[in-house]
Image (tube, rainbow, N blue to C red):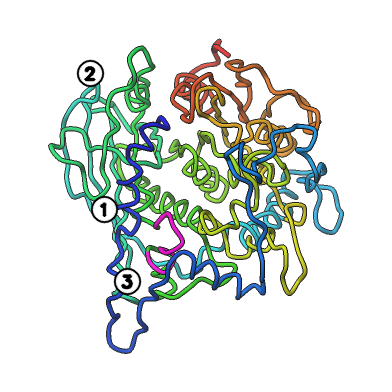
Amino acid sequence: MQSNIFKTFLPVFAACAALGAVPAHRMAGAGETELRKWTTQEDHQNMMEQLGIRKLRPGPSGNESAPNHANYDESLANPFPDLPEVLTLKNGEKVATAEMWWKKRRPEIVEDFEREVLGRVPPGAPKVTWKITETTEAKVGERPVIGKQLVGHVDNSTFPAISVDIQMILVTPADAKGPVPVMMMFGFGRLPGSKTPSGRGGWGFGPPPSGGDPPATEQLLAAGWGYVYINPTSIQADNGAGLTQGIIGLVNKGQSRKPDDWGALRAWAWGASRGLDYLETDEAVDARRVGIEGVSRYGKAALVTMAFDTRFAVVLVGSSGEGGAKLHRRNFGEAVENLTGAGEYHWMAGNFLKYGAAEADFGSMNAGDIPVDAHELIALCAPRPTFISYGVPEKGDAHWLDQRGSYMAAVAAGPVFRLLGAKDLGVGDDYKNAEMPPVNAGLLDGQLAWRQHDGGHTDGPNWKYFIPWAEEFLNRRPQAERNH
């Protein structure tokens, strides 16, 4: 998913942002409340008022000539150098066994992320009913496939004014002898053999650039895998104005969020989990080997999905940056204050705004006050195979993403992988001084993996490394030599 393609389709994504929701001005049924029609700015201000925040610090600019440009000086990048200890309970007790991790420490970390960072999925989240709306037999590249267009209708009987229909495409090899592993990808794909874009939001991205690798879809099929496209904006809009619609608006009956309610990242992850519910029922799919993938904001969502739903077997986290694999405590490129501003706050729980507060009833808070950080989000994936992918700034994977901050987080997550019997990056635990490997020199020997390719804002160049790595750790092939 190249950055120039993303820009090309940005207007299309925006058009999808309110997918599944009726116009905001429509009234609900008798006895129900009206859908709240707010702009992003109005919704953002409402959350600030709920939290008692009078002023937020502005986020740094990505324009290096701007007065408030982001910091790219490594000597200033670690104002909060000490990360929360991932294997220490809140009472100070050290976590020494896998049982302590699962029963005590992991629930503490999950609670902090849910309350302060990503928000809670409501306990009464509605049921999703899946329906196959179209089946095709076609070819992807040179391989015959069976494609299924699926729609997951979310039960909206409690608030019929909002309708949410999750759009998903499943493609499996036609000649498979049994169930196949599948990679679920956040994005917008085309149903093979379909004459028109599939469903609302089904777009293909065309062939790869001349001389590049085959598309991930073709590489997966060549390895005997299937793939899924799940349309994130059919689950929840990618803007603050949409928070009273989509799945978040549905459960809130068209009203605004409370501070610990879920944001879009958690909503997209919830939708992916509902997609996995369906895949567990499809005889063409090996449901024990379903992975999740995304790039950029959808890389954040892929990491969140893997962290919270332990049924997912493997993850490829592409160029995820702040809110994903990047440490919040780093002052390098995008910052917490960008996530608390009106442009990105909808990804997070409302409570996250507190950490960008300059003036509030509670004083002020900053990144150093967040009880958890990205290394713990990565640790929640352990011991399952977790691959962190980045490109290089020279090709468009900007310094803004803070590749080093994500590498530090991966190093700091290592002790949990080891505690649970998996192998980490193999570089020790000194995240403060860990040197990043050279570009194109991956660390792929363990269930926690890192590779920075020499391309741009995409995980495309890493698929040919990811697939054999995943095959090995999912016991799909014998131990073998790999190119690192």
What secondary structure is found at the residue carrying circle 3?
Answer: loop
For this rendering, which residue is in front, 168 or 74? 74
On the rendered structure, is 125 left or right of 453? left
Residue depicted at 44% across the width and 52% down the height: 268
Q: Nearer the viewer, mark 2 or mark 3?
A: 3
Q: Is residue 175 above or below residue 103?
A: above
Residue to which mark 3 is pinned: 24
On the rendered structure, is 203 left or right of 447? left
Q: Is residue 430 above or below residue 44?
A: above
Q: Is residue 240 magenta?
A: yes
Q: Is residue 160 magenta?
A: no
The crowd level at tag 3 (other Cα within 10 Å; few <14, some 14-19, many 20+) is: many
**Earlier-in-chain disc, 1 versus 3:** 3
The amino acid pointed to by label 3 is Ala
Residue to which mark 1 is pinned: 151
The amino acid pointed to by label 2 is Glu
The crowd level at tag 2 (other Cα within 10 Å; few <14, some 14-19, many 20+) is: few
What secondary structure is found at the residue carrying circle 2?
Answer: loop
Q: Where residue 316 sits in the image (x, y, percent)?
A: 50, 33
